Image (cartoon, rainbow, N blue to C red):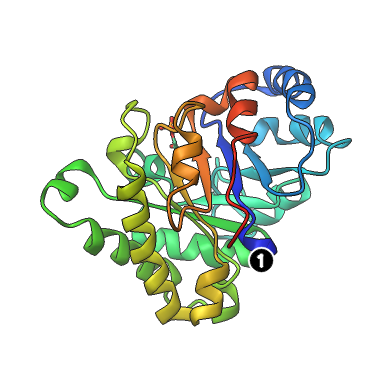
Amino acid sequence: MTPLRRPVIAGNWKMNKGPAATREFFRQFKPRCPARTDRTLAFFPPAVSLMAAAEMARDRPDLLLGVQNIYWKPEGAFTGELSGAMAREAGARFTLVGHSERRHVFGESDDDVRRKVAAAFEADLVPVLCLGEKLEERKAGQVEAVILRQLDAAVSGLPEAHIAGLLIAYEPVWAIGTGVNATPADAAAAHAVLRRRLAEHAGEDAARSIPILYGGSVKPENATELLAAADVDGLLVGGASLDPGGFARIALSEVRASG
Ligand code: PGA
């Protein structure tokens, strides 16, 4: 098992949990989920709660943190935005980039996503590049075309060494927050398409080492079967990551010992 393909189980809290609720979450989560060396756990609280999370994770270096979004400029007159360097300083190791809600609620383009991926590396953050098709695109048989377009745009101009350092999250838009998850077979098929393209961009070794997470209505009940699917190297969990007990169950799911 290559260390990078250790399964990654991540919680995207979206716009939920201020600092007090964040502290309470970790108070409950830590005893339910002892440290494990065979997986990586990461949390994406709202940026205002990042330092509270960092404080709560101080005695648990296995619990890694990230932000949900960054802007691509390092500083300046960009009201409401957050730079990668600031997020890093406050305790983030990762940043989500191009989450479906950023793309579809806030109008982020493929080109915005490309800039943010590059900015994440500048700030020494690992970008978790999120991509996935909408329901109408799936119905029109465009899954492959859409996710490859999103991937190609995001890595355009990126050095191969950086591509090799990406995490990818395949999150079909129709599965996010709907209770309808992709089947393990659907996830495996999309992940295989992405991994083949990653090999074209950065070589076979890099493609093999890049974790590709599945996200979209992951729950304690379906986590194990999704993690067992070919090419699924982890999970990005939204709603079900808000409950410490439920997320601990997901985080402790059985994982494949290979990569
Ligand atoms: P969900 O969200 O688990 O609530 O479907 C996943 C995500 O948006 O990352």
Q: Which residue is mark 1?
A: 2
x then y, percent, for residue 72: 54, 59
Residue 159 visible in the current orientation:
no
93 w.r.t. 17: above or below: below
224 w.r.t. 148: above or below: above
The kind of residue tagged 1 is Thr
Image label count: 1
x then y, percent, for residue 176: 36, 35
Going 77% across and 48% down the picture, which residue do you hit?
37
Going 51% across and 43% down the picture, which residue do you hit?
235
Answer few, some or many: residues within 10 Å of disc 1's Cα (few below 14, many 20 plus, some between 14 and 19).
few
Going 33% across and 57% down the picture, which residue do you hit?
190
Horizontal relation, residue 49 to residue 237: left or right: right
For this orientation, the residue located farthest to the left is 140
Going 45% across and 39% down the picture, which residue do you hit?
225
* Rendered image quadrant of residue 211: bottom right
x then y, percent, for residue 196: 38, 72
x then y, percent, for residue 75: 64, 56
